[in-house]
């Protein structure tokens, strides 16, 4: 992963365990005129360290994140690139904004009368499809299906579900999937005008929460069959047990309790998991009044007395839009393998309307077997992925 908490699995895991956040004033676009401008940018990222076969200058900011994250995922998986190039591969990357950051740059240059406003070099960066195609070029994959999924802030989970189906149906041998987005003026301004940008920190489930902080980055996961992973001795972070998707189409921006509950039901049924078997829920948990209240109510409606701990990694990462549920899925996986629950930081007092144990401020050690990862989006695009612990060899069912 590439994130505001760090790049690579070691930095990311250490930050989650420590409850760190790198909130600071946004620098990637001009925030003049905004009363507050905090965000969760990726700082100190050097794409040339990981991107070798594609001209970095031809890539937009989000595509640089996704391509570097894919390189890191392949390296962490231990798979030989020659093997990957001979196999049937799927690349599925979810996004909210695509390369809107580059479009912002073009508009700014045009307004300023800059000579590069409509240059081919800058125009090439703007295609949202490059978030996935640049990975294929970088890894030199030819026997590959490539796609971008634009279901906004739930898109990372959509990409994982898409890849899960391709693997279990035998349509692909390996899948690199997840999400990527870059901080951009368009989305910051949109949330600001909705009065949904927090002035200082993101405080999910807190009585005095004031909204989101926009973030960025990319989370890419390597998926393969259990038979393939065990045959090559791969390190297994977790098993995708199943997923659920729903679109309630209730409101352009407001979450709907019934639609969220339905999506969780579908995911549990698809995974063959009972609510009481879920040890942790990684919530969408944006820190807005409407989301946290509605999500907590839907969770309580479905889980009742068996409601597990419910945490929001956005308290640390900010809201990285299309990358959000992918980064959270990685967080869920390392939580399982490392035996801890990441905290919900910046927490002072739980809102009575969000009556969940959000593991405030300090990580706790935990024996996790099954974790649920929630992702909601504008337009009622809902997605949930269930991830389970792999406990060793067993009979593989063809």
Image: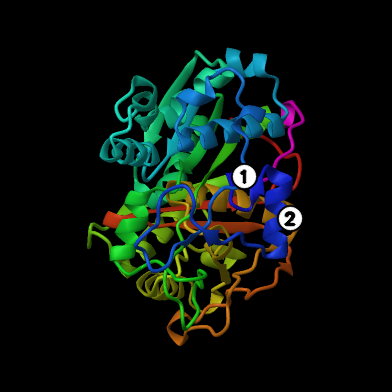
Can I make out residue 224 in this image? no
Q: Is residue 381 magenta?
A: no
Please provide percent x and percent y for residue 189.
32, 57
The x, y position of residue 386, in whole percent, is: 54, 52
Residue marked by disc 2: 14
Asked if residue 231 lies in the magenta stretch, the reply is: yes
Question: What residue appears at the point 32 percent right and 41 percent down from the top-left corner?
Answer: 108
Mark 1 / mark 2, whichever is N-terminal = 2
SS at circle 2:
helix
Find residue 352 and name its label: none
Residue holding disc 1: 239
Residue at 37% over, 72% down: 294
Quadrant in which residue 50 is drawn: top right
Q: Which of marks 1 and 2 is in front?
A: 2
**Residue sitting at 40 percent across and 66 percent down?**
197
Q: Which of 347 and 310 is in front in this view?
A: 347
Image height check: is 231 above or below 271? above
Residue 131 vs 285, above or below: the answer is above
Secondary structure beneath label 1? strand
Is 126 or 27 nearer to us in this picture? 27
The quarter holding residue 106 reads top left
How far is mark 1 from mark 2, CA to CA? Answer: 22 Å
Q: How many labels does the image show?
A: 2
Secondary structure, magenta segment, majority class: loop
- At which x and y percent is residue 225? 60, 32
Q: What stretch is highlighted in magenta?
A: 230-238
Considering the image in quadrants, where does the C terminus appear?
top right
Can you say which quadrant of the picture contains the N terminus? top right
Left or right of 57 on screen, residue 294: left
């Amino acid at each position: 992963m590439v994130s505001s908490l760090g790049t690579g699995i070691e930095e990311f895991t250490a930050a989650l365990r420590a409850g760190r956040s790198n909130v600071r004033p946004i620098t990637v676009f001009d925030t003049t005129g905004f009363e507050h401008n905090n965000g969760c940018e990726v700082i100190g990222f050097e794409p040339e360290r990981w991107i070798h076969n594609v001209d970095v200058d031809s890539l937009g900011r989000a595509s640089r994140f996704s391509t570097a994250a894919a390189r890191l995922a392949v390296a962490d998986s231990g798979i030989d690139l020659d093997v990957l190039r001979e196999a049937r591969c799927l690349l599925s990357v979810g996004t909210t904004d695509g390369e809107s950051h580059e479009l912002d740059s073009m508009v700014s240059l045009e307004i300023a009368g800059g000579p590069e406003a409509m240059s081919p070099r800058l125009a090439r960066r703007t295609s949202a499809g490059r978030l996935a195609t640049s990975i294929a070029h970088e890894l030199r994959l030819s026997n590959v299906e490539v796609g971008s999924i634009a279901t906004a802030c739930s898109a990372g989970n959509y990409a994982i579900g898409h890849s899960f189906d391709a693997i279990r149906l035998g349509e692909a041998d390996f899948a690199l999937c997840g999400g990527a987005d870059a901080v951009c003026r368009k989305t910051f301004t949109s949330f600001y005008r909705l009065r949904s940008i927090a002035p200082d920190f993101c405080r999910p489930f807190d009585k005095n929460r004031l909204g989101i902080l926009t973030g960025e980055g990319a989370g890419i996961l390597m998926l393969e069959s259990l038979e393939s992973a065990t045959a090559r001795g791969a390190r297994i972070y977790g098993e995708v047990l199943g997923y659920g998707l729903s679109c309630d189409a209730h409101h352009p921006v407001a979450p709907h309790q019934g639609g969220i509950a339905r999506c969780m039901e579908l995911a549990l049924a698809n995974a063959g998991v009972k609510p009481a078997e879920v040890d942790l829920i990684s919530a969408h948990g944006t820190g807005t009044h409407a989301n946290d209240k509605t999500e907590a109510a839907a969770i309580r409606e479905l889980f009742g007395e068996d409601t597990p701990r419910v945490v929001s990694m956005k308290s640390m990462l900010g809201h990285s839009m299309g990358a959000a549920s992918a980064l959270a899925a990685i967080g869920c996986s390392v939580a399982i393998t490392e035996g801890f629950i990441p905290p919900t930081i910046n927490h002072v007092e739980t809102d009575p309307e969000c009556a969940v144990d959000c593991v405030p401020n300090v990580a706790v050690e935990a024996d996790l077997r099954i974790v649920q990862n929630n992702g909601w989006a504008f337009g009622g695009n809902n997605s949930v992925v269930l991830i389970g612990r792999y406990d060793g060899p067993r009979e593989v069912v063809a």
